[in-house]
Image (spheres, coloured by chain):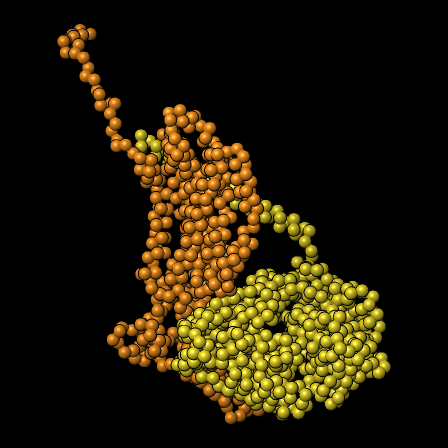
Amino acid sequence: MNNLKSGTSDALTRTASTQLIWLGLAATIGFAMLMGLLYWVSSLTGSHTTTLNAIDAESGTVTLLLRTEPPQLDSTRATDSVSISVLGHVMEGLLRFDENNQLAPGVAERWEIREDGATFWLRPDARWSDGVPVTAHDFVFAWRTAISPATASEYAFILYPVKNGESINSGNLPVEALGVRAVNNQTLEVEFEQPLAYFEELVAFSTYHPIREDFYHSREGRYGADVDDLLYNGPFEMTLWVHGAHVRLEKNPDYWGRERIRLNVIDMPYFTTDATSALNLFKDGKVAVVDYLGAEQLNEVLQQRWQLKRFGDGSVWFLAFNFSPDRITSNWHLRKALQLVTDPSELVNRVIKLPGNLPGESLFPVWLQGVNTFFRQEHPVPKIELNLEAAREHLEIAMEELGLDNPPSIALLVDDSPGAAKQAEYFQNLYGSQLGLDIRIDRQIFKQRLAKMQNQDFDLAVYGWGPDFADPLTFGELFASWNPNNNGRFNNTEYDESVRLAQSSLNPQTRMEAFARQQEILIEEVALIPNYERGRVYITDRRLQGVVRRAVGPDPDYTNAFISSD
Amino acid sequence: MKDLVLIAKDFAPIAVEREAQSITRPSLSYWQDAWLRLKTNRRALISLFIVVGLLVFTIAGPWVWTIDPAAQDLDQLSSPPGANRRAIIVTPYLPWSGITADSVPISGQTIGATAEIRLAQPATTQAVRLEWDPVPGATGYRVYRNLYSPAPDGALGLPIGEIYDARRISYEDLLDLRPTRFWYSIVATDELGQEVAEYTTLVVNVIRVVTVDEAISDGLVGPNVVPKLGDEVFVKLHPLGTDYLGRDMLARLMYGARVSLFIGIIAPLFFVLIGILYGSAAGFIGGRVDQFLMRFADFVVALPFLLFMILFKIAFGIGPGESGILPMLVALIVLSWPATARLVRGQILQIREEAYIAASQLLGAKTYYLILRHMIPNTLGVILVTITFAVPTVIFVEAFLSFIGMGVAPPTPSWGSMCNEGIQTMLNHPHELIFPALLISITVLAFNLLGDGLRDALDARMRSRE
């Protein structure tokens, strides 16, 4: 009886599994056919851009991808790197960056910078895309719009060097009081708040771009929101903007320097932040450049024998401390203990593993210019030797001062990118195993992390700062007590004085010495623990030449790019 | 034809075989019978062994394999199982100031490539130190590194170094050094900082090294042996390799199993228990009470899990970076029982009307007897199916929540979070994804097959078909 039962059960099972196999086979084939059908349908209805190659030499077209869609292209309100990059192609300020990353005449033909102000003489052949000449009034209007409290531009502070800028932005003066004036259509007069050493750098920035008043008002608040809501005066003009899907730039026939521009069309039909899909598009010959690669993609790139390039994006990444008195990180000995066990070289070479990053040593990155050569060559960073014994002693003192019996628990705020998580876990293990500290990782999405930093809701935070202009001040200012981006509220009187001096002095020697003093104070006070200076590796199609990458200004820049014949 | 002769013996009565009526096998209880049937089901039996094995792996494993799952071995990052562990003992790393030439020859000709690249010292996983001859007319150098030969198309590989001083004729590579073969190329740059076309390449075989201190502290040499420079040792063993931070995969899988299986078993047990009580109460009492109870169950189904998970997390006072396992467990139990309750209620309603229940009642069976003897055994099949499906579902929920940062906090591993970390390195280091994924798959399959076998073994209706 028992035998019989198990016999039927086996037979049942066998037929059941045969059926299952057939069913599975049928399902697989059916699914494959369905997919094939869908693919065929999509190829019938899909846009034709997908069949184009990344580079079309005949029509001078280059196909690229964008990280995200620009939120909007109103130059007074643009803050993100994508908007600034696109604006760098379709707009032009008084000055621009050339193919060697040097400042070159833009709308201004020539200029003169004095101690109390500056004069710009505009070229007569600079035109808007509707043929109307660009005049000094357009700059006056744009600057007044950007500084106006009604616009609430996040980058309004970059106009503070212009006279009365700060008072206007805080609502104490009318916008007409701004120290900028159109003498006539071709001459722009600027008054400074105080003597200023780096104004040329500033006027190339997108917030200083011109806007024509009658056009701005005719758009009724939609300026920069769509392809028809913008007037262009740059080397390219936008001809297509399908929100969330497609941006196309074409050569501007009215641009004064049109002879220089060799590309006819820059097509951007893909928006993605995913490095793997970007790499697949490149592999299929759909895009000509992939400019964000992770360490995990590098092996494939090497295997495919693609040409890798590197550039420093100028930003400095570090662990920021919260100096609020109720936080344990306000204790100097605790910070010193962390400093004495942190080895940026290990982080860069063993954990991040992406080529191009430099181990961080200071808030001031290596590429900053000093008086004669690089600032860091003139003022080397005081060397910190790793010392576990000393670190443990400092931790003992810190615990005594804080009245703690056990090593404290510290919240480390990071964003939710995979790279940040990896670094956070590295620090967690480092400080845990070396000092016995309990590091709690607080992973937040980018916006939430910013909000938490602004509310001082952190002990330690992984923080990056990119330059707005090519002067050490863009970094030095960050730790000034009045800077809203000084999230940890570092407050040091000597440091503040030094920043004030660097802001107002015109003497390069005095300024660089001030920055050197700031660098020393930051290290003595352990105001931050430098992690790395970020470098990026990217791949381009070998035929696309002349792409300019830069730390300051629109990046990437294709205005000087061309397609080589071979 | 022979005559048939009958004798007296032919008329004797045939003996009555009373044995036919006797019971030949011992009486079996319900559970003994179930166990016997389970034993004949080979798949279920294997699954049972796998589940027991997993429990042993989880509970006893860390006692045997005592490696700390959070310890980072930065010398063996993402190393696959069975990697070559041979290493040479060397002195500790000392900074290198590099080589700077006094002057660079100036040439009117076009800038070429350097004549030769040399190793300043043997290439090790500590550092690869390159030096080369200055290139006349150069303004600086770029250093590239490839895993493949740059010839013939000049794919130089990773841009690892930029030197802005032509007199600086050395480079120290520290980046992600592994015991493998590298092709290093040096290209000179011209006045504009652009690279020239020609390059020189050097093939370097990197050897794995450890310092004397590391060899002693990691126990790579015997307790009484003093390691000598140049000795060959084997670096720490990681049977299943290491992850992206050099953490031992085997230890992480063991600890990860604790979280995954804990949630995966405890949560279904509790919510199925609640579901049985609730559902059988509703089904047995019936009427208005049943209506009310089931509408409340419908209401609970409509509650969004993630939102409640977050609410519980806040209510429990779980700060950032602290484990969210407890609120996850509570949220799962509080919100997942209605499905079981509905099933059990349906079963009870059905069984209540069966003829044998009526017969039993007529024979004087009490309510508790009815429930224990007839109702629960008859719903066991359904219940076990629910548990069977709940275990893998809950393991996946845990994995998902750990990924979005609501579950385990690093460095605590769970299979789900390990998978999510492994996906990022899938192409280069597949073992980081394969092992946790395999364990999840095996666990899910084992629970499914075991559940199937248990249902067959316990189902009273199947038994009646014998």
Q: Nearer the viewer, residue B280 or B193?
A: B280
Residue at 65% over, 90% down: A508
Residue at 46% over, 87% down: B97
Q: Is residue B136 visible?
A: no
Residue at 81% over, 78% down: A176
Residue at 18% over, 12% down: B13
Q: Point out residue B401 in the picture as x, y percentages from the top left corner.
A: 51, 56
Q: Viewed as shown, does residue B418 lie left or right of A114?
A: left
Q: Nearer the viewer, residue B341 or A302?
A: B341
Name the quadrant of the N terminus of chain A: top left
Q: Point out residue A275 in the picture as x, y percentages from the top left corner.
A: 57, 64
Chain letter for the orange colouring in the rendering: B
Chain letter for the yellow colouring in the rendering: A
Q: Nearer the viewer, residue B408 or A17?
A: B408
Q: Point out residue A277 in the picture as x, y percentages from the top left corner.
A: 58, 61
Q: Viewed as shown, does residue A346 lie left or right of A495?
A: left
Q: Viewed as shown, does residue A9 lie left or right of A371?
A: left
Q: Note whether B14 is above or below B436 in the view shown.
A: above
Q: Point out residue B337 in the picture as x, y percentages from the top left corner.
A: 49, 45
Q: How many marks are shown on the rendered structure? A: 0
Name the quadrant of the C terminus of chain A: bottom right
Question: Residue placed farthest to the left in the image?
Answer: B8
Q: Viewed as shown, does residue A515 lie left or right of B434?
A: right
Q: Is residue B41 visible?
A: yes
Q: Note whether B451 is above or below A238 in the view shown.
A: above
Where, by quadrant of the figure, is residue A212 drawn? bottom right
